[in-house]
Amino acid sequence: MRHIFILLTGIIMLSCQSKQHQDPCGSAWIGGQIVNPKHDYVIISHNRNTIDTVYLDERNSFTYKIAPVDPGLYFFRHFEYQALFIEPGDSVMLRVNTIEFDESLTYTGKGSAKNNFLTELFLLNETVDQSLVNYYALTPEVFQATIDSIKRERLMFLDQFVATQDVSESFLSMANAAIDYAIFSKNELYLSANYRKQQYDESVVIPETFYNYRAQIDLGHDHLWTYYPYFRCIGYYLDNLAYLNYRTTEDFDRRSFTHTWHKIDLIDQMTTNDSLKHSLLKNTVASYFMYANKVDEEERMLIKFKALNHNKDDHKLMEELAESIMKLAPGKIIPDVVLVNTDNEIVSLKHVIKRPSVFYFWSLNSSLHYKKIHNRVNELAIKYPEYDFIGINVDDQFKKWQRLVKHLKYNAASEYQFDNFGQAEMTWLVNSVNRSMIISQERIIVNANINIFGIKVEQELLNYLNQ
């Protein structure tokens, strides 16, 4: 599941420039300890390119020397991605527990202060994002005042940090961009929410002054094109511009064919950096494919993508993704995957599907989610006893999963794991644990991508029963 999200992950590349003088690129060390490791290695990357694979020792630790260093964000990947800002002379050590990745992450050593700052800034933004939906009900004026207040707090946080640390211009530029584009994203999301309200006649008039921040959005920044807060903001901005091209005929839906068609036209026309353009095209079309369910539209989208994006590797990736998606179209027989039951026995899909079935997915990493989704399934099972509800755990920790199923008294006969998650992930494109699949008794796909918490799932269940 995490592999799919890699399509939407970016990193920044900055030049070797300090506040006082030009400094040649030297070397730096990164390392650390992984608590509850998922694999026996970490992957180090920079500027979207893998530098090396580093194996953990018997203490689940690693060290790696980067030489030469191009000051900016480097990423280590161990099930999740994490950025480190590295400059010549740094020796940054991290410690992280994979069970609570972001919350447990800490840095020590030379260069750790700026990375702890960025982590805290990220968590502050995450806290605001979790409450953002409540801000959508505010008037534009009150929303703007609230967001301006948040931005002042972030800039004050940065000023306090800079007052006690000797930071480079490269770091300062990136930190300011992190603050600015996070705020710009919130403005764009407010506009998107207002567009969605139009279908209920609840939208409000946005004053022209609200849009003033857009003058600061650079659609072709040479150094920020791989930096995720910037990349994400550009995507939200173009989403809103795309909607203006079809708002008289359809509701706002960034997953729809119409929306994606208009958005990739805007990407092609408005972005001035080819690398940014190709990345936006790839991520936009990949996101569309993940939710597409009409083969003819998928074929048209693939043709258009290949005409606009000239990267042959991206062509191959999209062709493979489109092929997998088309195999999950309604009316197709569901591709076979190998499952494992709670007795650690291999089970084929044909022996699992005995009646119309709903497959849902969950992970050990979120107790809140797996309790919530099982409660939801219990509700649906009572309403729709004609269906079997089959839970698929997406982790690779068999014993822990087995104990949890027993401890929480889940129905073990309806709980499975993938025998090979990496293979099943690409076969079934399990990109979200909120996703569910409705399959007929004959293993024919009714709907391979529907949110089990959404309002449409019950209508789909009824529609199939009433055929």
Image: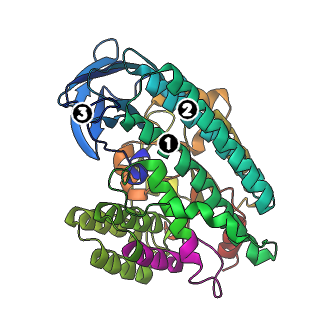
Q: Is residue 65 magenta?
A: no
Q: Which residue is mark 2?
A: 158
Can you tell which mark lies on residue 22?
A: 3
**Residue 71 horizontal side relative to residue 338, left or right:** left
Query: Seen from this angle, which residue lies furthest bottom?
Result: 249
Kindly identify the amino acid type of the residue bearing the numbered disc 1: Asn
Mark 2: which secondary structure? helix
Residue 170 locus on image (x, y percent): 36, 37
Q: Is residue 38 visible?
A: yes
Q: In the rendered structure, does residue 255 fall within the stretch colored magenta?
A: yes
- The residue under label 3 is which amino acid type? Gln
Residue farthest along the top direction in this orientation: 59
Residue 88 occupies which quadrant of the picture? Answer: top left
Looking at the picture, does residue 341 appear above or below residue 380? above
Report if the CB atoms under discs 2 and 1 are less than 8 Å apart: yes
For this rendering, which residue is in front, 291 or 251? 251
Q: Residue at x 48, y 49 (%)?
A: 229
Residue located at (27% from left, 63% from top): 314
Q: Which residues are magenta?
A: 240-268
Q: Which residue is mark 1?
A: 176
